[in-house]
Image (cartoon, rainbow, N blue to C red):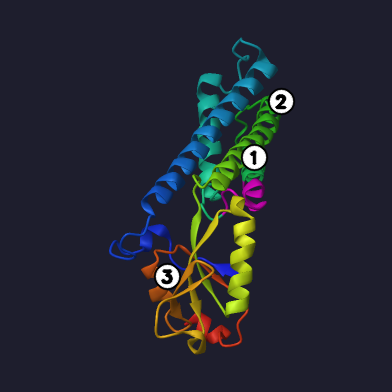
Amino acid sequence: MTSATLLSPRSVPPEAGPGAPTGSSRARQRAYVRTIVLLDAAVVTTAVAIGYIARFGLEEPGRGRLPSVVGGPILVLAWLAMLKLLRCYDDRILGYGADEYRRVTGAGLRLAAVIAIGDYIADVGVARGFLAISFAVGTVGLVVARFAARKHLHRARRRGTGWSRRVLAVGDTAHVLELLHTLRREPYAGYQVVGACLPDALLAPTPQRLDGVPVVGSLRSIPEAAAAVDADTVAVTACGELTASRLRR
């Protein structure tokens, strides 16, 4: 099974999927992203404070060093900007998979490298011990905070109260059913199948349901079906009638 994002939540027309219960799901998504941003800000600020106190104590470092009242906030803002730049708040990687942790770790490493090179060229005088402690504590803290937030999200998803993606499953009956059962066994992954598209030959003149999921279209009407159920993700399963060229179209 391969999956690809067809429509983002912001790109779905307001009139699509009347009555579809997506408002609360999107509100949960936005709330989760805000929580992650606040967690990151708290962790980075704490890490910089710990790095400064561990390196200099409570006294201002000697002359020739960048004053902490300036350097500390700059480092915090630069770190948060790097997290944003590397798309660490992209909802497609939040809550599942290892990519979220890789991006968070990479943000710290890249920023450390940029600061080290800049300090060498401009001779700003940033203490290396301060940077080493701050980045070590901050990187570990960010990963731990993301892990804790993810576990809380998984528990909420199992209870049916957590943010989940709305999925349109595309393929033949057997593979769509297999995908449906797999996602139902793993609710923590955050994929809720809200509709299915089957080959033309399998469609009936009357409305159909596939293990409780409405069949909303054929392989010729995937975009329209996604809009009808307000799906933000399309999961494409194996199907002989769905060729690569048709899928691109």
Label 3 vs label 1, nearer the camera:
3
Q: Which residue is drawn at 49% across and 44% down?
A: 161
| Residue identified by numbered label 1 | 147
Amino acid type indicated by mark 2: Gly
Compare marks 2 and 3 and give the one earlier in the sequence: 2
Res 120 visible = no
Residue 46 position within the rendered picture, expressed as x and y whole percent measured from the top left: 59, 24
Q: Residue at x 44, y 41 (%)?
A: 31
Query: Relative to the observer, which residue lies in front, 107 or 23?
Result: 23
Q: What span is in magenta?
A: 93-103
**Residue 95 is inside the magenta segment:** yes
Q: Which residue is drawn at 64% across and 63% down?
A: 182
Mark number, residue 226: 3
Compare marks 2 and 1 and give the one earlier in the sequence: 2
Tell me if mark 1 has few (under 14), some (14-19) or many (20+) residues whose alpha carbon lies within 10 angstroms of its own: some
Compare marks 3 and 1 and give the one earlier in the sequence: 1
Mark number, residue 129: 2
Residue sitting at the far top: 59
Residue 130 position within the rendered picture, expressed as x and y whole percent measured from the top left: 67, 25
Q: In this view, does 75 lie above or below 32?
A: above
Separation of disc 2 and disc 3 at Cα?
53 Å
